[in-house]
Image: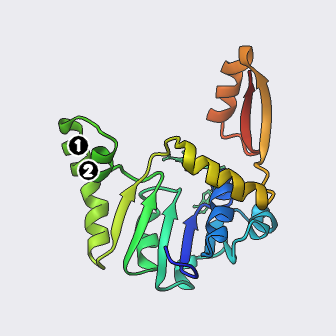
Amino acid sequence: MKTNSSLFISGGSGSFGAMAIPLSAARGLKVITSGGVEAKERTLALGADRIFDYRTEDYTEHLRDVDGAIDSLGDKELPRLFSILRQGATVVSLRGMPNGSFAKTFGLPLWKQWLFKLVGLKNERMAARKGQKYHFLFVTSDGKQLQRAASILEKCNVRSAVGNVYLLEQAEEALRDVAAGSKKGKVIIKL
Ligand SMILES: NC(=O)c1ccc[n+]([C@@H]2O[C@H](COP(=O)([O-])OP(=O)(O)OC[C@H]3O[C@@H](n4cnc5c(N)ncnc54)[C@H](OP(=O)(O)O)[C@@H]3O)[C@@H](O)[C@H]2O)c1
């Protein structure tokens, strides 16, 4: 995306947003997000221009012609997200249905590519109505990208929210914590 373009991140008040917001702002993007109000100050300090409290505000009533979006909430949120984007804009979802192009890029076997093509059709059709595009992303590790991200995060002095810390032998307990939706931050297993 070009400098000064607008980017909407759904659910940006969590740990994904804590990384995505400063990285996007450092690229010169105008970042708008939705999320929990408790994280408002922290989210603005990370570089977001505005955060909509999802419990009390409806961003679709305020935003139009946004240049792009990253979605961390999934299929239920996608119609609302597409409605605020300009013609031709792209949504990258971390939680929506995977689609055919994801399966191909990910190198899945042909039968799985067809399967994902089918399940991803709904979101692709929704996007196509305004010439928009839908992509599903599954994060993979890429050394070069991580190095670039690390130097931006260091410059911005970003600290991830850390929740409970466990020893390796407490891994089961740690997983139960994650499954229960630990709200304090990333659950850490110390090696
Ligand atoms: N595909 C991938 O490779 C990939 C990579 C990273 C993450 N993800 C997925 O992305 C999602 C988010 O990850 P995360 O680590 O950021 O989770 P997280 O730390 O739990 O954060 C989620 C945030 O979303 C907020 N939220 C909940 N419902 C909302 C709504 N309707 N509208 C706006 N905000 C809402 C929450 O606020 P409250 O706490 O106040 O409710 C919380 O601040 C997860 O489902 C994760 O699995 C996928």
Judge: label 1 CB < 8 Å from ligand 1.
no
**What residue is at 64 percent from the left and 76 percent from the top?**
57
The quarter of the picture where residue 154 lies is: bottom right
- Front-most of residues 144 and 79: 144
Question: Disc 2 vs disc 1: Cβ atoms closer than 8 Å?
Answer: yes
User: Which one is earlier in the sequence, the residue at label 2 or at label 1?
Assistant: 2
Q: Secondary structure at mark 1?
A: helix
Residue 53 visible to the viewer: no
Q: Is residue 133 above or below residue 180?
A: below
Q: Distance between the Cα atoms at labels 2 and 1? A: 5 Å
Residue 23 appears in which quarter of the rendering?
bottom right
Which quadrant is the C terminus positioned in?
top right
Q: Residues within 10 Å of mark 2 (few under 14, many from 20)?
A: many
Tell me, yes or no, if residue 73 can be seen here.
yes
User: Where does the image place residue 32, in percent across and percent down from the top left?
Assistant: 62, 74
Q: Is residue 62 above or below residue 150?
A: below
Which label belongs to residue 113? 1
Pick whichever, 4 or 40, lies toward us.
Answer: 4
Q: Left or right? Give the position of 71 relative to 36.
A: left
In the image, residue 164 above or below residue 168: below
Q: Amino acid at mark 1?
A: Gln
